Amino acid sequence: MSIERSNLLSMMKLSINILIQSSLSLGRTMDSEYPPLQQFFVVLESCLKHGLKAKKSFIGQSKSIWGPLELVEKLCPESTDITTSARDLPTLKTGLGRGRAWLHLALMQKKLADYMKALLDRKDLLGEFYESGALILEEEGTVIGGLLVGLNVIDANLCIKGEDLDSQVAVIDFSLYLKDTANTEMAKDEVKMTAILDQKHYIEELNRNLSGTVTDLQAKMDSLEKTNGKLVEELTAATDRINSLCEEQQNLKQENEVILQSSQRKEEVTLQDSQVELETYKQSRQGLDEMYTVVWTQYKEEKRIRQELERELELQVGLKEEMEMAMRLLEKDTHEKQDTLAALRLQLDQVKTLNLQVVHKVQDSQREAERKQQEAGLMEETMSEMEKSMKELEQRLQRSESQCTQSVQSDEAMRSELEGKVETLQKQLSDLDMLRLGLETELRSEKEQRQNLQRVLQREQDNSTELHTQLQQLQGLHMELKDLKQEKTALQQRCEQQEQALQEMGLHLSQSKLKMEDFKEVNKALKGHAWLKDDEANECKQCQKEFSIARRKHHCRNCGDIYCNNCSANELALPSYPRPVRVCDICHALLLQRSSSTGAS
């Protein structure tokens, strides 16, 4: 850890010195494409990542410098603007990209040294993000904070929106620091020693970065394989559950259809029964109404006859005591008859109220109506006989008044006739009593029929309650079906999301494999090829032409040899460089062949 800290500190010193010297010699505002500035940000990022604790995520372990940089917002309120702008940029999706954007903005504000000093003073807060022995927590961190003060003389104009800060590869280009940039009057031995030490630090740092990236990629590949296996198991379980839910849904549909058919049949049967009962009830009610009108007319006629009899009896008050006794007997008989008629009327009213609830048994009610009509005819006949007898009585009374003074024998005959008529009236009253008894028996039978109808209605009500419960069960089944459908859609969405995640992880795996191959190729190239010095080459390696003022020397960034401009005019993107760099014709053809073979596979 101490060697890594010293290497990073020396790299930071070199990058800051080169950046300040180049900016002063350039004499203008620097942009994001300026190579020393890019390398400064790469070195600063590697210093901030040193000893950083890894956070576990769904894809694997990741190290992000955005966590400790967010603490500056609490320590320095003037950094709130750059923190919010870095957090709210729509093009940035990772914490690493937001941290890089924050560093760019802080450099443009010329307050990067102030912010880092405030952050380094609070090592108690940094202990949450960094392990013990990290560069930020040691003395090298304070030294770096002091070195950053010299950057306040630099004017930078950096565009953040157009750059892809999330996916940039942070690789340190040590070729900038291996060149003799300052024209000093040092001895040749000291120059060689410093060059050797710089190359040593460069190789050590490069090997450390490569080993770190290889281990990180291996850990990512292992975690991706594990998560892929788990997702496959979850997918199989989800598919099994979806199949079982589909089968249950089909069974529920079939049961629902059977229940609907049975309920429809029961409703049809109940509707037919209710229609039949309604028709029978209407017919019976019509017959009872007709019978009631007939009885009511009979009662009116009897009432009228009674009133006529009372008038006749009032006219005969002045007759003899025997006639009065006979009239009193007749009045008593008429009063009894009136009471019986009133009782019959009340009984008929009760029959009417009870027969409103009668629903069926039409044939019995018709036979009873015919019998009552016959009895009514008999009563009409008896009333006609009574009218005839009353007329005869009137005639006889008139004759008796005219012949009263003439003979007593006619009075005796009249008395005998009245007694006979009284007996006939008593017989008629006895017949009416028999009729009343018959009507009472009919009322009892009708009460029994009403009780039977009430039982039938109770049964129908029970059936209707059962149908209501079945309908509620059907509604509950419909709700369960809706819930099952919603669960099915949620499971389908989850399966689609898992498939998308699997596809994304496959893409990440393929990209990580390609990066691993690129890193392996870079490592092989670095092990096999050494960076050739300018003094060691006097002619082009390919065309064998000597170098001069017109024909200048150019290094191939892949193999490290020196070529002329014509033999190294090609540019390609290499893993160790953030943008396309110069390569020789041989390396250009070789790299194109490798890329075509990997693309075809």
Image (tube, rainbow, N blue to C red):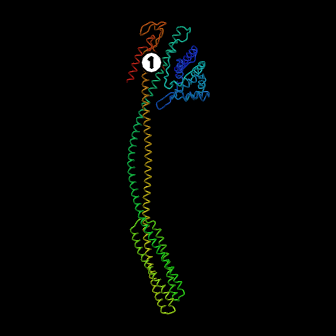
* Residue furthest out toward the right: 77
* Residue furthest out toward the front: 402
Q: Toward which corner of the image does residue 488 lie, by quadrant?
A: top left
Q: Amino acid at mark 1?
A: Leu
Q: Position of residue 31 (x, y in %)?
A: 55, 19
Q: Position of residue 243 (x, y in %)?
A: 38, 41
* Count of numbered tags: 1
Q: Between residues 287 and 529, which one lies in front from this camera angle?
A: 287
Tell me: residue 260, above or below residue 181. below
Which part of the image, by quadrant, shows the C terminus? top left
Tell me: residue 423, above or below residue 588. below
Residue 109 in the figure: left or right of residue 61: right
Q: Secondary structure at mark 1?
A: strand
Task: Quickly name the residue at label 1.
Answer: 572
Q: Residues within 10 Å of mark 1 (few under 14, many from 20)?
A: some
Q: Toward which corner of the image does residue 542 lie, by quadrant?
A: top left
Q: Between residues 157 and 151, which one lies in front from this camera angle?
A: 157
Residue 363 in the figure: left or right of residue 93: left
Tell me: residue 245, above or below residue 389. above
Q: Between residues 588 and 45, which one lies in front from this camera angle?
A: 588
Q: Position of residue 357 (x, y in %)?
A: 45, 65
Tell me: residue 569, above or below residue 447. above
Q: Position of residue 184 (x, y in %)?
A: 56, 9
- Taking the spot 42% from the left edge, 77% from the top edge, the residue there is 378
